[in-house]
Amino acid sequence: MLQKKAKGFKRKGVLNPFQRAKKWVNNPIKCQRRFVGVFYNRFKKKLNLDIIEAVYLSCLKKIYEKNKKNGLITLRGYFATTLYDMARMSRIPLYYQEKAIQELESRGLIEYDPLEFDKYDESTDACVMFKIKC
């Protein structure tokens, strides 16, 4: 039984974790649990921020497609559930989540927009607005 299982990994159409991760970069729904988890478990000591950014960016693009009005998203609602739940499920420490957001901001991919606070009445104090530049 054990030998069969070991051989099964090499079957045609079975991807190794790295190929699987590449395949799922553009699909945040599929990669929620495994994509970063695979890498995080393998490289706990040297976790590459680019991996997390790839996941964040793929999520941002999905969100941007859904509400294209003015490209505004909040850290609550959809954005919060997609990114933070995914990060929690994938066991990414909060430190890396914050780093990834800072990195995206410094690269000019998302832009913090405090002026948009006035447009949202509901608990604006806890809302953080970002403009996505995709």
Image (spheres, helix red, strand yellow):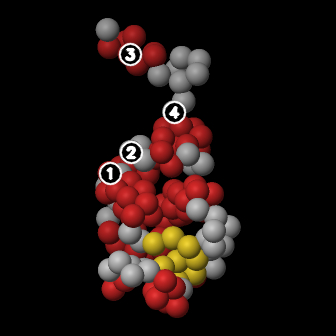
Answer whether labels 2 and 1 touch (C-beta < 8 Å): yes
Give the residue pinned by disc 3: 5
> Mark 2 is on which residue type?
Arg
At label 1, the amino acid type is Met
Q: Is residue 78 above or below residue 121?
A: above
Hey, what amino acid is under mark 3? Lys
Q: CA distance from mark 4 to mark 1?
A: 21 Å
Residue type, label 4: Asn
- The residue that label 2 is drawn on is 33
Badge 4 local density, few (<14 within 10 Å), some, or many (20+)? few
Rounded to the nearest angstrom, the CA distance separating label 4 from label 2 is 16 Å
Q: Earlier in the sequence, mark 2 or mark 3?
A: 3
Query: Where on the picture, by quarter, is residue 69?
Result: bottom right
Q: Residue furthest right?
A: 134
Between the C-alphas of marks 2 and 3, the distance is: 23 Å
**Nearer the viewer's eye, disc 1 or disc 3?**
1
Question: What's the residue at 34%, 56% (across, down)?
Answer: 85
What is the number of the mark on residue 89?
1
Is disc 2 surrounded by few (<14), some (14 to 19) or many (20+) residues within 10 Å? some
- Secondary structure under the numbered disc 4 in the rendered image: loop
Q: CA distance from mark 3 to mark 4?
A: 14 Å
Lower sequence index among marks 1 and 3: 3
- Near mark 3 (Cα within 10 A), the count class, few <14, some 14-19 or many ≥20, is few
Determine whether 108 is above or below 38 in the image: below
- Residue furthest bottom as drawn: 115
Q: Are marks 4 and 1 in contact (CB under 8 Å)?
A: no
- Eye-nearest disc, 4 or 1: 1
Question: In the image, which disc is placed on residue 27?
Answer: none
Residue to which mark 4 is pinned: 16
- Where residue 105 appears, as percent x and y from the top left, is 55, 79
- CB under 8 Å between discs 3 and 4: no
Label 1 CA crowd tier, 10 Å (few <14, some 14–19, many 20+): some
